Amino acid sequence: MERLTKLEVRDLTLRFGGVTALDNVGFDVMAGEMFAVIGPNGAGKTSIFNCVNGVYKPQAGTIRLGDTVLTGRSPASIAALGVARTFQNLGLFGNLSLIDNLMLGRHHLMRTGMLAGMFWWGRAKREEITHRADVESVIDLLELGPYRRTPAGMLPYGVAKRAELGRALAMEPTLLLLDEPVAGMNLEETEDMARYLTEVRRRLGVTMILVEHDMRLVMDLADRVLALDFGVPIATGTPAEVQNDPVVVEAYLGGAA
Ligand SMILES: Nc1ncnc2c1ncn2[C@@H]1O[C@H](COP(=O)(O)OP(=O)(O)OP(=O)(O)O)[C@@H](O)[C@H]1O
């Protein structure tokens, strides 16, 4: 699938018993755009990701990636369409080396299965070499070379977050969902991550949705922002417009009070 793909979310409603996690949410993410979703704790940000990747089944609404309707599809089929996400608490296998974690991210792109690989050794080998080269280009992009053979569980926190981004990029995503990529990072690590995300965007042009509490990162990176409060969209616009919107300010202050 073409990497530059638009995402359309229409009338999305998601309920858990009496809780309405998303209430008639709609937005478009343009091809190649960095779109941020912000809001106080429990506003519904993660629920949006879980609806897009098929983990949650919304009661109403449609999500479309390019010409393909995602709603109703399984998480595996949505991943195969090129929707990748990073996890706030890292989705890496701690005992596997960084490079093996990234190779696993490419599993759905591999044509030769294990059994076929035993009989078609030559083809499997060639495929492995191509995949290794693609993984190496992600490692170069994120400057992870020195950690190539390090077990993911031994990586310093900031590097592990970057490896987590690498794992998602190794899937060659059309749409990348970034779940709090700088959560728990110090200022220096946050600035590094901002630089890598800018580079990913410049070099790969992948469409991205960013969920993040760090407003500085959102202000620096996002083209447009959607603010949610109790599952209800309260503002959409440029980072500056949304940050100064009185309803958004009230939602945050109200949450802090
Ligand atoms: N699996 C679930 N079962 C029941 N309720 C859920 C489930 N997932 C989310 N919710 C509820 O839906 C609402 C939105 O949650 P969500 O995790 O999407 O918010 P969030 O904006 O990502 O919050 P945070 O910033 O704390 O991560 C909350 O009231 C939450 O308790």
Image: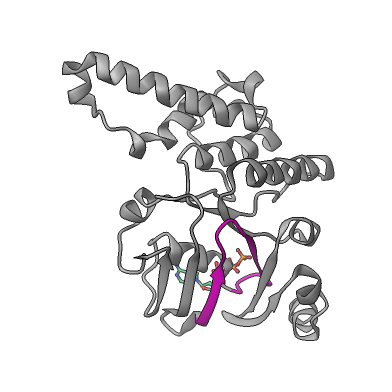
- State whether residue 113 is above or below residue 33: above
Picture mark count = 0
Left or right of 121: which side holds 36?
right
At x 71%, y 60%, the residue is 222
- Residue 95: tell me if it is visible: no
Residue placed farthest to the top in the image? 122
Numbered range of the magenta stretch: 23-43
At x 69%, y 41%, the residue is 199
Left or right of 118: which side holds 171?
right
At x 79%, y 76%, the residue is 241
At x 48%, y 33%, the residue is 93
Q: How is the image coloured?
A: one colour
Left or right of 186: which side holds 130?
left
Image coordinates for residue 114, horizontal then vertical, percent: 23, 25
Left or right of 81: which side holds 47?
right
- Residue 54: tell me if it is visible: yes
Image coordinates for residue 140, horizontal then vertical, percent: 62, 26
- State whether residue 255 is above or below residue 56: below
Magenta stretch contains residue 34: yes
Image coordinates for residue 228, horizontal then vertical, percent: 63, 77
Magenta stretch contains residue 17: no
Tell me the quarter of the image containing the C terminus.
bottom right
- State whether residue 195 is above or below residue 29: above
Image coordinates for residue 99, horizontal then vertical, percent: 51, 24
Name the foreground residue: 149 vs 78.
78
